[in-house]
Image (spheres, helix red, strand yellow):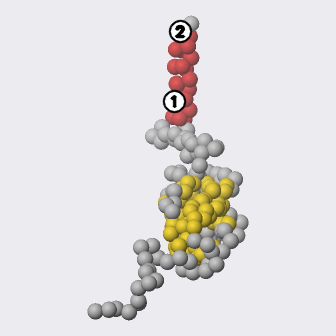
Amino acid sequence: MRASKTSILWTVALLSAAGVAQSGQDSVTYTPVAPATPTSNAPRVTVAPVAQVTAMRTKDTVVDLDFRVAPGFHINSNAPKSEFLIPTKLNMDVPTDVALGKIEYPAGQDVSFPFSPDEALNVYTGDFTVKVVVHPLHSVVPGKYVMHGFLRYQACDNGQCFPPKNLPVNFEVKVVKEPPGHHANPAQSPHVHN
């Protein structure tokens, strides 16, 4: 029985070699590469934890949100070149009396992919940062507030795109009346005494 298995394996190997030689490709070997998809449930984009942000009432405070696209994937930038592509977009819900200012997205990179070699797509790969402006209103009560939201994106690899996903994004803002470290003494005169 062992001899028959060995002879079958040799026959398959010889037929494969003969097929390559007949096609004239004996000097070129094509090895298919497995797609970069780890598993269908694995995150393709992650967000770094955000340290507590201290924001003064009536002042703009910029919060950096650091994201990472998994190796082997890309996502469309916030301003893709085609209206048919899904842009990456941050959506935030803010507490009452805390306003959300401008959201600043980084510029994407123009990259051509094997599935569309003649058209460069504007994408994010690797690490990128989205800046969010938080503006506590004068009416807000000083204290800690949790900002909830999500990053909407569509991940693709070199061969296919996957359904759009929402990545939860949360961070805490500590609202204060005055800058941290500033201790005014109301009993002390604001004038300098010698």
Quarter holding the N terminus is top right
The amino acid at mark 1 is Ala
Q: Position of residue 146 (x, y in %)?
A: 61, 62
Identify the residue at horizontal 56%, vertical 74% (top origin): 133
Q: Is residue 85 left or right of residue 27?
A: right
Q: Is residue 98 visible?
A: yes
Identify the residue at horizontal 64%, vertical 43% (top origin): 40
The amino acid at mark 2 is Arg
Pick the residue in front: 25 or 157: 157
Pick the residue in front: 2 or 167: 167
Q: Is residue 41 left or right of residue 13?
A: right
**Can you identify the residue that label 2 sits on?**
2
Q: In which quadrant of the rendered view does residue 119 lie?
A: bottom right
Q: CA distance from mark 2 to mark 1?
A: 23 Å
Q: Position of residue 84 (x, y in %)?
A: 71, 66
Callout 1: helix, strand or loop? Answer: helix
The numbered mark, 2 or 1, whose residue comes first in the sequence reads: 2
Q: Residue 137, relative to residue 69: is it above or below? A: below
Q: Is residue 113 visible?
A: no
Callout 2: helix, strand or loop? Answer: helix
Q: Residue 5, relative to residue 144: is it above or below? A: above
**Can you identify the residue that label 1 sits on?**
17
Pick the residue in front: 70 or 34: 70
